[in-house]
Image (cartoon, helix red, strand yellow):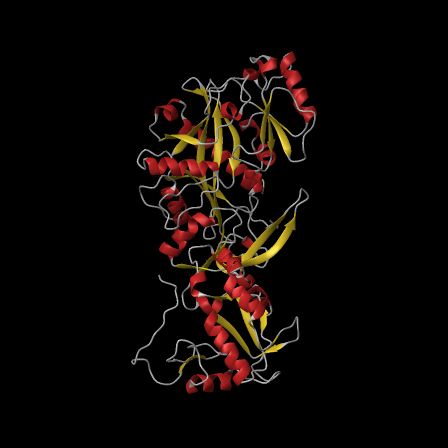
Amino acid sequence: GNTSVNWFTSDELPLGPIVVTPENKTGEQEEIVVKRSTFLPHASDGELMEVLSRHCCIPSGADGATTSPSTGSTYSVTLVGYQPTVQALCHILGDVLAAPSIQILKECILWEDERDSGQPQHQLMQQQQQQPRTQAWLDHGLLFNEQVVSLVDFLAETDTLHEQIDCLWEDGAKYVCDTGRGGHLCLFLPYLIRDYGYVEWMTQPWYEENSLTGGNKQYRCPLGRRIVDLCDEPKFSRSLRFFLAGRQHLDEKDLLYELVPEFMPPTFDSIGSAKAYAEAIMTGDDEGEPSQRDEPSNKFLWFVKAVNQNGGRAVRVTTSLPTSLASDEQLQLHVPRPLLYDGRFKCHVKTYQHIFRSASDSNWHVHMHDLFYLSTASRPWSADDLSDEAQITTMRTHRLYPDSAFRKRWNLTELLHAKMRILMERAVLRRKLHDALHVGGKAPATGTAAVPQFEVNSADWMLDQDGRVYLIECNGIPVLYDPTSPKKQALVTKGLRLYDRLYHQDPAAAVVNDSDLIREALALALTGKVPSTSLWKHVATIPALVTTAAPS
């Protein structure tokens, strides 16, 4: 596992240069390994000088030289590696052998004491460009007209853009690339490497998106824009898609309401429609919400929510209708007579779903995790208290196992399984969830297997005092906490930091530990199997419709 450079000085090394020719590969360049007896390359080393003069000093424009399409320059040698070694080779090639042209890949030059292999690879590449000693040498220490180019530009000038890494797959390696899109791949990645033999592929900038509200967001892709086995950017993932095609219909509240309006509290995309509904209730003309008519009209609670944000973010609570709504906001009426935990605290039930579109049997498979959670507010509930502490329930505070009294009293297992089946059936039958595009942007051809895709999402459910269950929202990328991961999880949210603190105070008593959920969700997607003790329970198989995949 040590990736540091190792230096060998042994009489057992064979004499003379070693020629390594790739087996069973035509058109590949041979590799030559030259031993040396000095710490740095030196012009007195005859074997090294012979190899350099024969293989690196190719006249400009001769066979073997590489030409840059963007600059028209011709290079005969490209250098990467330990900075003092690269510097010594620059002097030998430029001063002694008069090589016509040399290029240096700036991200691939580093001093030993500037290494930090614990960082994500794209962050390490950015840091390497800022190291003071290396940068000073690149700026001021080049003496022979060496050209410094970025690794991204170097790869972009090859003919490998969007090609699959077939030459490496022949050796049995599988590649995964986490571009930081924001899904759960960062949690799956340590297990893909440790348990499934994947190798991590580096990233590079892809494009930048300008925001109308200020600030730009940069998107990344696999280094060289290569198509790898697994990638969180679907356009670059060959064998499995980590985001569902059409996922917005589950994740965004307005689109979810179109699928299952009878499951959710009354939800409105305009102030006028919300006002008309409230007036109908106050006058007794409404027949759809009998429990709501029992509430005094001045106790109406409205939630102003952004349709595409979850986890309690971008939520405002008010007792009166606002004067305006933003284009991405909706109004949702509070659940009437909410069931309170311990008779005092507002709460909701959280469930986790594993949604998988199989390539082998052309079906959608839905599993639900059999450990439900209760999320409770931190302050006793009152319709007059509009604070987040009383009204917003985001943190998981209690486990609800199948035999828990709360879960059995309200028959939550059967009830929520049935509702999730209906939701998923409508999403598939109405073609909201659909087949994904193959890599390269092509729809699956007739008779070919669809691209497998999966996602772990969560659903938030609230009960009223009569036991009626309301679906509040679904979260496409719910917060998951893995304290036993092979690679320490970044604690980027308030909830993760709280879960981490509670876990380390008392691991056995901690409410939140999603390690098994994460590992088994990955196994379910890759192998279709989970241990017999797994809490992932199959709740639905939905035949996929034969469709032409829509871009997503």
x and y, in percent, of residue 112 in the image: 43, 65
x and y, in percent, of residue 162 in the image: 57, 63
Q: Is residue 406 left or right of residue 182?
A: left
Front residue of 147/326: it is 147
Front residue of 446/178: it is 178
Residue 160 visible in the snapshot: no
Give the residue at x 47% y 18%: 466
Vertical comparison of 525 with 427: above or below: below
Quarter containing the N terminus: bottom left
Vertical comparison of 389 with 203: above or below: above
Q: Disc count in the image? A: 0
x and y, in percent, of residue 546 in the image: 56, 49
Vertical comparison of 425 with 79: above or below: above
Give the residue at x 58% y 75%: 146
Front residue of 11/290: it is 11
x and y, in percent, of residue 299 in the image: 58, 15
